Amino acid sequence: MIWIYTIGIALFSVTMKLASFFNRKARLFTEGRKDVFKEISKLINPADHPIWFHFASLGEFEQGRPVLERLKLTYPKEKIIITFFSPSGFEIRKNYAGADGVFYLPIDTVANAKKFIALTQPKLAIFTKYEFWFHYFNELNKKGIPLYLISGIFRPSQAYFKWYGGFNRRILKCVTHFFVQNEESLRLLTSIGINEVSLSGDTRFDRVYENANSLKKLVEIAHFSSNFPIFIAGSTWLADEKHLAAFPQRYPNWKLIIAPHEVDEAHILEIEKLFPNAIRFSSLQSQLVVDPSANEICQAQVLLIDNIGMLSSLYQYAKVAYIGGGFGVGIHNTLEAAAFGLPVIFGPKYDKFQEAKDLIAIDAAKSISNEAELLSSFEYFKANENAAAAARAYVKQKTGATEMIIKIIKLNLVH
């Protein structure tokens, strides 16, 4: 199976290089890795034995961030390095002040894994949720470097738990300790002989709870809202936005903020076709610089967020949230909104997200399949004040994963 894995990695690498000629993300993915070993050599002293955090993308970074920042606070002398697989994580967090170096993870080959470990000499490695790279895991294991997986979640349908999943199980057995989100994951791992497992819960709850209690005020949004109630649509795709198109006319006494998942010009123009009277956040900013009162802006009903990074702070201004992705591969982060006490609405593809199921069970979320159901769900939450309290209480109840993880990880740190 190793040869199949190796060929698959090689084909993926070639595909990304070819795609880089016409796709921006593929170009960033490829170009960002060209000189990564030089950058590591320049910034990292292997004698420091840094703590290595790896994240697939931005979502996993936010998930693992509470652990990273708690370790940094507890052990300020420890060096920390971060790697990302995806450009959407690296490009946004490449200047993150909490790390001594942020890099793209070189493609998972034997040579790259050996070179990366030799150049960084990490004290321990922490991966988040579901990034499993055989050669990196194997090299860490051979060198006796502790490897932790935090906020892990597993399902019976995965290859690890099938008769043909021997190679996949071999990858898992390189992990020193698993911190998993639910009972099912713990049970699945122990069923294949992996017993170094703790049911810690999901560190995202710690992150979103902290975020909701450390408010970052946004003057422009306060100006736009102008005391109108706000319905916010976060991490949306075109399929989501089409279902939202009837909202402004149906609810003239509400305002709508759309923070799309992709903010390239082509997508923003598509949204503007659906909402022709919308104003962009960049335009709002510019107008307020020229005229801080800019009262005419208050008349706009729909605001398009044309940048990345604001969403987690936007929820504080809203009453109800719609979370995108449910008409594609799966919904995005519902917990950020729930932490602010917002009932949430999302599309039909949420089965892989336990928190979505939980929020539905406590009547703080609804799944919809069409525009009529979206408007009906909005009507329900507009009239049901208990949903807000239920959402907020659910998030608070689930905090504490970070503390459990730190207690075990610190056993491998030198004081």
Image (tube, grey):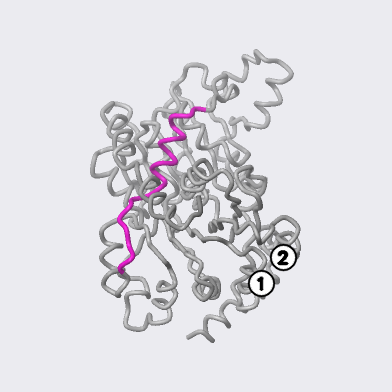
Q: Which residues are magenta?
A: 195-215
Judge by depth and name the residue closer to the eye, 400 or 392.
400
Give the residue displayed 60% in from the left and 78% down from the top.
Answer: 110
Q: Is residue 279 magenta?
A: no
Crowding around mark 2 (Cα neighbors within 10 Å: few <14, some 14 to 19, many 20+) is some
Task: Tell me which residue sits at (28%, 32%) in the image.
Answer: 387
Left or right, 397 with respect to 21, comes to: left
Q: Position of residue 25 (x, y in %)?
A: 65, 58
**Residue ranking furthest to the front:** 415
Tell me which amino acid carries mark 1. Lys
The numbered dot on residue 115 is 1
Please state which amino acid type lies under the numbered disc 2.
Phe
Reply above or below: 311 against 137: above
Label 1 element class: helix
Instruction: Provide residue 251's location: percent of width, then percent of height.
Output: 42, 26
Distance (Cα) linking label 2 and label 1: 8 Å
Residue 37: mark? 2
The picture quadrant where one finds residue 41 is bottom right
Residue ID at (56%, 58%): 52
Q: Nearer the viewer, residue 186 or 1?
A: 186
Residue 155 in the image, given as x and y percentages of width and height: 32, 65
Decide which of 370, 104 is in the foreground and name it.
Answer: 104
